[in-house]
Amino acid sequence: MQPRLTMSAASWLLLIALSVLWGGSFFFAKVAVLELPPLTVALGRVTIAAATLLLLARLSGVALPDSAAAWRPYVPMGILNNLIPFSLIFWGQTHIPSGLAAILNATTPLFTVLVAHVATSDEKLNAGRVAGLLFGFAGVVTMIGPDVLRDLGSNVVAQLACLAAALSYGLAGVYGRRFRAEPPLRVAAGQLTVSTVLLTPLVMLIDRPWTLATPSMTAIAAIVALALLSTALAYVIFFRILASAGATGISLVTFLIPISAILLGTLILGEQLALRHVAGMVAIALGLAAIDGRPWAQLRRTWSRGRARGSA
């Protein structure tokens, strides 16, 4: 039997770290797509990340797939977790504001719980999980600012692309459960290698990168940061969390990404923390607590003990 999926304290800490790494990806991608086509940026991201992880796997003695049959399971993962969402989000960001893209990306847990409910036996929907997801999504909208929703209805295709990316992430989270017994480094390297192989002919055919102007050092630095921090390191953490917390647990990172981005802006850039930011953080915290379940269970136990003493 598979061990029970739980969000331990270590999983929550890793999820916070992952939210910081992926929070930076929106910024890095926005910088890169100013000078390069979305598919080319996606290819640069996965190629550098795959090469880095393959080297680390070799140096650390982690066995890599050694046959076509061993590589085959990584193909759907590479398509669902990288090829489709990276391409759609990068393209979407060329047509809609980053804030709206982040809100649409925050629908990932909603798609994930629906897919997991249908496709798994241990990640079923319950009242606490549904309430938590709604609180979390409301918190994201509140933090980023409801005004950004005014752009809904314009550039509909770009918005649908971001929603399709969120659905793809949800499918990837559920599919990725099959790799729970494998080292996270092997799985991350495997899916990124496959993604590189799949993306290369598309980029050569569509973008023809040899015809593009040479990007600036700023754009190159953004792609490198996107690859090393928001992809290579992030996916090792991703698969470690997925192994213990399941698809729903890992998808919660999209609720935490706006918090990380806003707190980093406040601490590093001196940006002002507005009341709506605090309200959004509270809503997200309540949502995560409801999904986790343990804080509410502890409150119920405390309440029951208090009533028992009062009636004694």
Image (cartoon, rainbow, N blue to C red):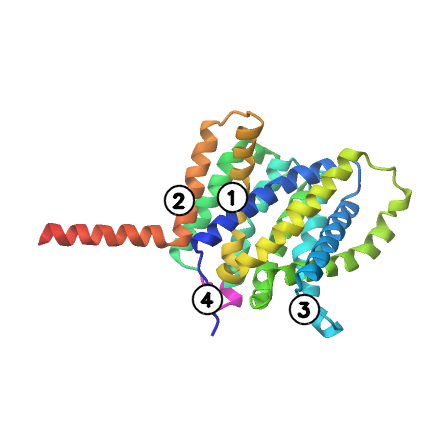
**Residue 55 has which mark?**
none
- Is label 1 in a helix, a strand or a loop? helix
Q: Which residues are magenta?
A: 117-124
Q: Residues within 10 Å of mark 4 (few under 14, many from 20)?
A: few
* Residue 110 pos. (x, y %): 52, 52
Q: CA gap, disc 4 to disc 3?
A: 22 Å
Quarter of the figure that contains the C terminus: bottom left
User: Furthest-right residue in view?
Assistant: 211
Q: Which residue is mark 3?
A: 73
**Residue 122 has which mark?**
4
Q: Seen in the image, is 214 located left or right of residue 125?
A: right
Q: Which residue is mark 2?
A: 286
User: Callout 2, which amino acid?
Assistant: Leu
* Labels 4 and 3: the sequence-earlier one: 3
Q: Which residue is mark 1?
A: 256
User: Callout 1, which amino acid?
Assistant: Leu
